[in-house]
Image (tube, helix red, strand yellow):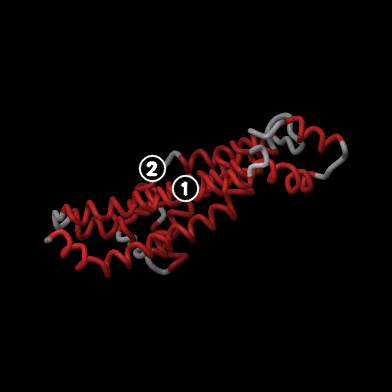
Amino acid sequence: MMLLETIIELLPELNKAFFETIYMVTISIIVAILAGLPLGILLFVTDKGLFLENHWVKTSVGFVVNMVRSIPFIILLVALIPLTNLITGTTIGPTAASVSLSVAAIPFFARIVETALREIDKGVIEAAVAIGASPWLIIKEVLLPEARPGIIQGITITIISLIAYSAMAGIVGGGGVGDLAIRFGYYRYDNTVMITTIVILICLVQLIQFFGDRISKIVDKRS
């Protein structure tokens, strides 16, 4: 009975925290797709033996991507405080946390896109090059359609990772479910809040994974 009463009392805070998490993740995944997709394509097409082979570009972009990915998110969160303040005018709240989440998501998604493109049959690409298709046409008509299922799976994985990162953002007042767990659960030693937030995150991740898998199967021409 006490458990139910505690949850009911927390409903306004839970509702607010849930939508803050959705808000942060939505902004971050949009930025990740807009920046990470072309970055992933660039990493692929400039590789050795491909139609835009460029060792310098491949090495330089790959180094930057790997460098950002190698930084633990909690350290990146703190390191980007000046940039966050410059862009949003504040260092707390879900909008501020979205800056660090976006920076972390871009290289993560870029590598997933590159991996998805590597799964394409090289013969298909070679055939497009042989008939004189332009690089843009190959990317638009061959690479993206062929890699679509893998890219959608990549978006799913990135969203789930962002949910985990957003929970960490709660440590520095980023808002969302993680912030609620820290303030009401950890600081107040309230296991009810901790368990409730964990259940919410698990349910959210399961739903995202389910719909991501379904969409990926629908667009997969091989199935």
Whether residue 67 sits left or right of residue 114 in the image: it is left
| Whole-percent x, y for residue 207 in the image | 43, 51
Whether residue 136 sits left or right of residue 34 in the image: it is right
Q: Nearer the viewer, mark 1 or mark 2?
A: 1
Residue 210 badge = 1
* Mark 1 Cα shell of 10 Å, populated few (<14), some (14-19), many (≥20): few
Whether residue 199 sits left or right of residue 193 in the image: it is right
User: Of marks 1 and 2, which one's residue comes earlier in the chain?
Assistant: 2
| Whole-percent x, y for residue 168 in the image | 33, 51
Whether residue 18 sits left or right of residue 138 in the image: it is left
User: Which residue occupies 58% across, 38% down?
Assistant: 62
Provide the residue designation for mark 2.
Answer: 72
* Mark 2 Cα shell of 10 Å, populated few (<14), some (14-19), many (≥20): few
In this orientation, which residue lies closer to the viewer: 38 or 71? Answer: 38
Q: Secondary structure at mark 2?
A: loop
User: Which residue occupies 27% across, 70% down?
Assistant: 12
* Quarter containing the C terminus: top right
